[in-house]
Amino acid sequence: MRIRALLIAAAVLLAGGAGFLAGRGGIPGDGDTAAETSSATVTEDVTSAGPGFAPAAVPVDNDAELPEPGAPLAAIHDTLVRRAAQGEARAACRLAAEHERCEVLRSQLRGAIAKTNRGPEWMERRLLEIDTEESRAQLQTLRAHQSEQLAEQTRLVAQCDATAPLSPQARARYWRQAALAGHVPSMRHYAIGNAFRFHDLMDALPALQTYRREAEAVATRAAKAGDVASIYALAMAYADLDGAYSRPFLAQTVTPDLAKALAWFSVLERHPGITGLSPEHPVARNVARRRAELAAAATPSEGARAADLAAEAAVPRHVEPAIMLSPEGGIHDIAPDACSESEFAAAR
């Protein structure tokens, strides 16, 4: 049992990747150069014109198929750059998501190499300590598994490295383009604050100014379209709640407002993304508790205002339970294949 526990722990350590990731949006054309992509002319056009720019002669087709998920970045990069420059929100989303995924993979590989470098000594000590053939075989299996994982991570990072990485500012610009175009998954990702990383946040300081001005409006637009993650993040932000954990970036951009918090928690209480959860799910319990607390604390005028605000939100009839939500209001990154989703928020 002891060796099995050690094997499981080592496997978990190996699989560990990047730390908590969060971010900010970007400013179009604020210093990123065309060298950040292999399609220099296209990138210069997007940079100078701003995200959302679409040449008049090229109609925007946000229904066009994106490349197959899992395709090597080098094989699709220039196509995505060109399509994003023509105003395709989903292409901008996919481009940003692919580069973001590569950053995560690089971080995971660095961690795996560090753990592997420490592993041999630990394994040799364990081989001397254990005294059964079965335990030795299990340890050898773990060693082989670690080698296989490291080889696969190395292969994936090599695919990423075949394309020059985008700067943090450029990645944020593409996320912002897709978000302002109304692509709901991109709006969620950008508004909640996942477009940038703590480890390169200083490289995005100009982008923080734009994000701070836009995050609340983008989140509200996505929330009114019925996106449960955006609704929950806004509710937590307006209530000035962080679940005793880290404070999401969105919460740092809004002014606490009891009526708005009560409105969004009221919407959540009838949203299928929440009602589909187990009553014991931390998010479901948090929604019920916070709504009751806010309703009890609200004045009659605040309660009336909250009811009016809640009536403006669309609540979808059928969605999957929001198991991806974190109690403090954060959410995991969207995967590149989420950019293929065709859900767009109504124009403001």
Image (cartoon, rainbow, N blue to C red):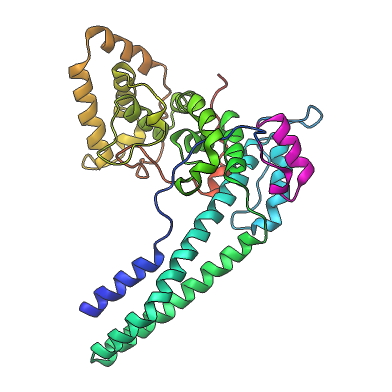
Q: Quadrant of residue 318?
A: top left
Classify 271 as above or below 306: below
Residue 60 appears in view: no
Residue 233 appears in view: yes
Give, as a single range, the part of the protein colored magenta: 31-51
**For the view shown, which residue lies furthest in the top direction?**
301
Quadrant of the drawing holding the C terminus: top right
Residue 98 in percent (x, y) is at 58, 51
The answer to which of 66 and 32 lies nearer the viewer is: 32
Q: Quadrant of residue 347?
A: top right
What residue is shown at x 59% (from left), y 54% (from top)? 69
Report whether 205 appears left or right of 255: right
Q: Is residue 246 magenta?
A: no
What residue is shown at x 62% (from left), y 42% (from top)? 170
The answer to which of 325 and 29 lies nearer the viewer is: 29
Quadrant of the drawing holding the N terminus: bottom left
Report whether 250 appears left or right of 84: left
Residue 63 in percent (x, y) is at 65, 37
Q: Quadrant of residue 285?
A: top left
Residue 212 in percent (x, y) is at 48, 28
Residue 211 in percent (x, y) is at 51, 30
Report whether 163 appears left or right of 346: right
Query: How many marks overall?
Result: 0
Q: Which is the main secondary structure of the residues drawn in magenta?
A: helix
Classify 152 as above or below 78: below
